[in-house]
Amino acid sequence: MLNPKLQIIKGMNKSTPITIAYGDGIGPEIMSSTIKILEASGAKLTFDEIEIGEKIYQKGIKSGIEDDSWDPILKNKILLKAPITTPQGGGVKSLNVTMRKTLGLFANVRPCKAYSPFIKTKHPEMDVVIIRENEEDTYGGIEHRQTFEVYQCLKLITLPGTERIIRYAFEYARSNNRKKVTCFTKDNIMKLTDGLFHEIFKTIANDYPEIESENMIVDIGTAKLADTPENFDVVVMPNLYGDIVSDVAAQISGSVGMVGSSNIGPDCAMFEAIHGSAPDIAGKNIANPSALINAAVMMLRHIGQNEPAEKIQNAWLKTLEEGLHTADTYNPETSKKRLSTSEFTDAIIERLGQKPEILEASDFSANQATIIPELLLSRTDVRPGLRQHRALKGTDVFVYWEPDNPDLLAKQLQHYSNGKFELTMITNRGTKVWPNGLPQTFCTDHWRCRFKSTGPEADSSTVIDLLSSLNNGSIDIIKTENLYEFDGEPAYSLGQGE
Ligand code: NAD
């Protein structure tokens, strides 16, 4: 059995400097509440504040962060961040995604737990931790408009990125005494990208025989999670599914306003609420600060300040238990009083040192190791099979072509292609339209033309010759994707209907 070495970030007992960002919308209200509670709890922290988000975007800085704001983040290595408003549309990048990727925060951990009967939920037994891959997938944000009609977003799933998040999920399960890890993928459709995620999940599951493992297609998995969350424990998935599914899980556990999250990397960590800046309720003193408070508790545990972490968590549980709730969780059947953000904050502070009587009290006496799994699968000395023979067998040439006539396009391509490649297929939006396409298939102005090498292998110079020849025939080439075989296995998808 492989045992990944774990890098443990040791607890620090002295006052720990952390970087904080008040964020946008409800951010300043819930951050003020959280800081007030942290200070009252006896947590040993000093705060370096940075300004990021809306105000910085308004200065014309497209990243939402000024260059010198990275210094305190990199120096302190711990960031407690309130939600940021991401301007919609082109021209700017999401600061949240930039932070996670720039700082190498590969794991996003989102515990979604029911606090029944005090917080109304249809799922009183729910206690699920969503572990979302945080750096890859479509969140590379690599998008292009390629023709007048077609836009593209690149989905990147990598071997080391996948290995790291899946090992993290199993190590998390092991160290938190969880019994099962479920993986959500869509590898019935995305056989290479999600197929890799699933394959690595199966491989790594063998290293953790004491933990049950299962894979589900993300659509039925989400449906089952929403219906019977008590059947799930730890759930790991690629970035986009994790983003969506964790909001579903948080909402059905009680409210998105309750769930905090940690973003963990080898060097830095960021703690935040899972919800956004809620501009609809900003400035009204009605937001629920619980998610950011829970994120701060996760942060305290990460830096080894377990005592104030436990104190805050138990005071918060006691407050919930007494029916003191903010508007989003207020329910006449289960709540005693609807509190404002500041009243809820004061209620928690008044209960610091108390424990819940009905809800299970938190016990953080054991240190929580921060898990940074070592990569084993991608190390050639451990698994030499990964160094495979890669052979270039052809190329997919994507072209812009207006006429809705694939036969004519095929004729043009065949006329101008050199003898080293044979045109084998044309697809439109992934569906085969030549040879023998159906007139019913809807076509856009974006065509994928598959050329296979007529010899045993192609090379880059023959591909360039092909492109040059097509270009001479006024074929409007948008891009190419090479067709490789790895150890004789085709490493590209078929066309639908091929
Ligand atoms: P949102 O999470 O801000 O709000 C969704 C709904 O939940 C709203 O009705 C809101 O009032 C409610 N809500 C959210 N948090 C609450 C709380 N603490 N207390 C009570 N009610 C709460 O989602 P959105 O409206 O889609 O996004 C608003 C902005 O936040 C967008 O610009 C988005 O890009 C950004 N966002 C930021 C982050 C982040 O900083 N990590 C995450 C998600 C969205």
Image (cartoon, rainbow, N blue to C red):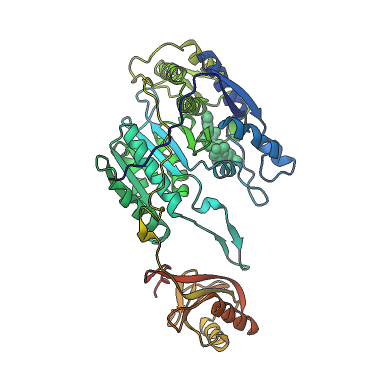
x and y percent of residue 189 in the render?
39, 61
Single out the residue that lies furthest toward the front: 381
On screen, residue 307 versus residue 77, left or right, reads left
Q: Where does the C terminus fall, quadrant-wise?
A: bottom left
Between 247 and 262, which is closer to the camera in this rendering?
A: 262
Viewer-side residue, 113 vs 371:
371
- Please state the horizontal and vertical placement of residue 61, each as a whole percent of the image: 71, 43
Q: How many marks?
A: 0
Q: Quadrant of residue 386?
A: bottom left
When the figure is inspected, residue 423 is found, relative to residue 379, above or below; the finding is below
Q: Position of residue 318 (x, y in %)?
A: 41, 16
Q: Nearer the viewer, residue 139 or 270?
A: 270
Extreme residue toward the left, this view: 210
151, above or below 200, in the image: below
* Residue 9 visible in the displayed image: yes
Q: Quadrant of the N terminus?
A: top left
Closer to us: 495 or 16: 16
* 165 versus 457 height, above or below: above
Query: As drawn, which residue projects farthest toward the right?
Result: 59
Q: Position of residue 492 (x, y in %)?
A: 43, 68
Position of residue 209 relative to residue 496, above or below, is above
Q: Which quadrant of the structure image shows residue 473?
A: bottom right
Residue 186, visible in the rendered structure: no
**Residue placed at 36% from the left, 52% from the top?**
382
Q: Quadrant of ligand 1?
A: top right
Residue at 67% x, 38% y: name it: 54
Going 53% across and 59% down the picture, which residue do you hit?
Answer: 154
Q: Residue at x 56, y 89 (%)?
A: 415
